Every structure is written in C-alpha cells, then in structure tokens.
Amino acid sequence: MKQKNLITVVTDHQLTADTIAKAIGANEKHEGYYLGNGYAVTWTGGAIIEAAFSPTESFVLSTTMDCRLVYAHNFKFAMRDYDNLVGYKKTEQDKRQLATIKALWKMSRTVVNAMRPDLSGDLDFLSLYYFIASPVDVRRGWMPILTKKAIVHAVNHGPQNRKEYEKWLSESIYNHLVDLCGNESDHKPTPIMEEVPVKDAPNVLDELGIGCSDMPDPTDGSCTITTDRIRIYTKRIPLFNLPYLLVEAAVELGFDHEKTVQTAHILYAKKLISYPMTVQNTVPVGVWKLMRRNMEILRYNSKWGHAIKDGTPSRRHNFKGETPYHGFGIVTTGLHPTDLDRDEERLYNLIVKRVIDAFEPAAPAKGHKANGKKKPRRQSRKSQSRS
C-alpha cells in the first residue's frame, strides 16, 4: 500500500465494496481492500466497533450542539468480540481487517462513509471514527441505490441535500440518546410514513393497542398516528418494506427470513433494487421521478413485463416533503438483470411484481383515455344512418 493521498471508501460488506470499487475504477484487488484510480475501497464486515453507552455527565439536547461530538462524549468504543459472545471464531479476522482500515485511513486525505444508508450505518461509522481517533476529512456517501451514477455522485459529492441530511442525523442521534436514557422528554422524532393494506388493519390496530372489535374497517386513505409512525390505510397494494418482504417471501417462495435478507442484500449489491432493510414503504419525490423511467425498463421483464399499463406511475405512494433519509419502499433501479441464480431471480421477480402493482397508474376518469385526452364521443347507430 504505497499509494499516498488516497480517497478511502469504507462500507459494511465485501459484496457492496466490490460494486462500489467497480463503479469508481478501483480495480486492483488486495487482501481486505480494492485499490485504483486514486481510491481505496474497504469494508468492516459489519459493526466491527461496538459503542457502549456510558454518559460521563448530563447532556443537553440543543440544535447548536454538534451531534457527532455528543455521540463521542456519551459512548465508549471497543472492537467487538464475537468469540466470547457466541463462540464464533472471528476475532483474528476482525483484527486483520481493522488493521487494513487503519493503514488506509492514515494515508487518506478523505474518508467516505459508505456504510448502509440508515441510522445504524452512521452510528457504526462514527464508532469506527472515534475508535481510530485519527482526524480526517469525512464525506457521507449515502447510497440507497448502487447504480454507477449514484455511486460516483455519492463518493465525490456526498448526500443530494447536505443540509437535510445533517438535520436528519442530528434529530436521529438525539432521539437515540433520549431512548437510551429513558427520558420522557417532549422531544419527538419526525414520523415515518408507511402504507398498510386495509385487510391488515385489525392486526396493526392491535399492535397500537387500539381495540377494534366495534370499529368499522378503516377506509382507503384513513390513518393512525403514533410517536414515530403515520400509517395510511389503502385498498391498493403498497410497496414492500422489509417486514412485508419477509412475510411475502415466506408465503410465496418458502424462504426463511435469513435467506430473504441475504438474497435481498445481494440484489441490492447487484444494483437491481434499492436498499431493502427499511420499514418505510412510501417514496420521496425524487424516487417517484426515477420510477417514471424505471417502469419502462420493467417492460422487458420476462415474467411480469406484460402487466405494466400505460400511463404515469401512481403518486399515491409519494409524500412531498418526506425526507429520503428515513429510508423508502423497495423499488427497482432501472437496470436489467443478467447474472442471477434461481433464488435471486425468484425474489427479484417477487419485488418486480409488487413494484408494478404499487405504481399502477390510476384508472382514467370516465370518458378519458390514460393519456388525459378525452375520448371521441361515439355516435349512435341512428345518427350514423342519418349521415
């Protein structure tokens, strides 16, 4: 590792690192990292550094505080020890990978945080940063979709909206601390929006502690609100989130949950679906715009392409103003699969079917075509005979 002045990209898993490395031209494969084109790409193998909550003094929730320093102040960081926890012999492998990350880190002018695009990914990276304790310029590579264009932009420029990302991160870290402290503060997290099929409403209401034996079924578009969730009920099929995907894959494909998670992550790393480990199943405006093109690509799907109807994708899953950093429903990326094994193909087609159903264009108004033009008025036989 003689190359100096690197930009080092750190991600969770080798499969994701391989995809990122190919996109940015880091094509030399070494033990524990990829190198090339001024970049190094390495991986942690999961949450390699554990953060133990141990506040040394009381803290104040304030928008003027740097959320990262608040996190550093209230946690102690150490390398995980799976050997003592579950008897899984991984400590030596973790030590070697951590040594590789440290060496690359010290030769880097910028380190890109390309951990999974959710709060746990950010916290895992912060734990690693404060454990290594070697200050460096950091850029957040937020990658819910792993297409080449998305990867290059994230590595070189960071989040699409840096201000919005920082606001989300601050709120999320403070809420995390409040939860750990058991503080009954009035500080409430920004609600996450999701859609729930009307047929599942009784189970959802039971989860919320709302008795529904004497209640009518929720109507299409009605909602229930908790401290962290807005559930909107719909008669139409919603997008998959991870919980719904786990259930559907078990019923339709016979997959256990571990197999579904592993296969979904492979599809994500192969750039075919968005990040699947999410509880959100709505989409922000930008993702809906991408689906206008991606739905056309799905017409080439050999199993479900024929089911795509003409017209603009439905916007009923799209919530204007919802931050994408809460995560969003599982969607396809617009790329056509070429190298899937049988199980990957089955799960991918299950997701394709759900995307097509969820984004099915709304039925045109009576007397109008799907493109919005009014149908010509049909002449009666009597008037035709007169002419």
Image (spheres, rainbow, N blue to C red):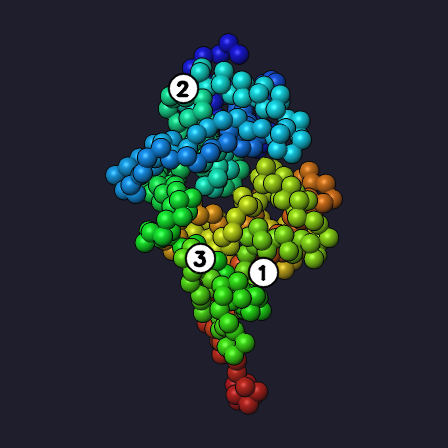
Inspect the image, locate mark 1, and give the three-letter code of the amino acid beneath it: Asp
Say which of 171 and 376 sits in front: 171
Q: Quadrant of residue 338?
A: top right
How far across and down, in percent of the image, does residue 243 sit? 58, 53
Q: Residue at x 52, y 79 (%)?
A: 214
As shown in the figure, which amino acid type bears the numbered disc 2?
Ser
Instruction: Tell me the residue at 57%/87% (across/down).
Output: 381
Of badges 2 and 1, the one in the foreground is 2
The image's mark for residue 278 is: none
Residue bearing mark 3 = 229
Q: Marks 3 and 1, Cα distance to the nearest angstrom?
A: 24 Å
> Which one is nearer the viewer's eye here, 238 or 217?
217
Is 348 or 82 nearer to us in this picture? Answer: 82
Q: Find numbered disc 2 in the image and state the secondary structure of the residue it sits on.
A: loop
Which is more foreground, mark 3 or mark 1?
3
Q: Are marks 2 and 1 in contact (CB under 8 Å)?
A: no
Which label number is shown at residue 357? 1
Label total for image:
3
Looking at marks 3 and 1 on the same chain, the residue that comes earlier in the sequence is marked by: 3
On screen, residue 42 above or below 234: above
Who comes first in sequence, dot 2 or dot 3? Answer: 2
Can residue 29 be seen here? The reply is no
Please report contact status of discs 3 and 1: CB closer than 8 Å, yes or no: no
Q: Name the residue: 56% across, 46% down.
A: 276
According to the image, label 2 marks what residue? 134
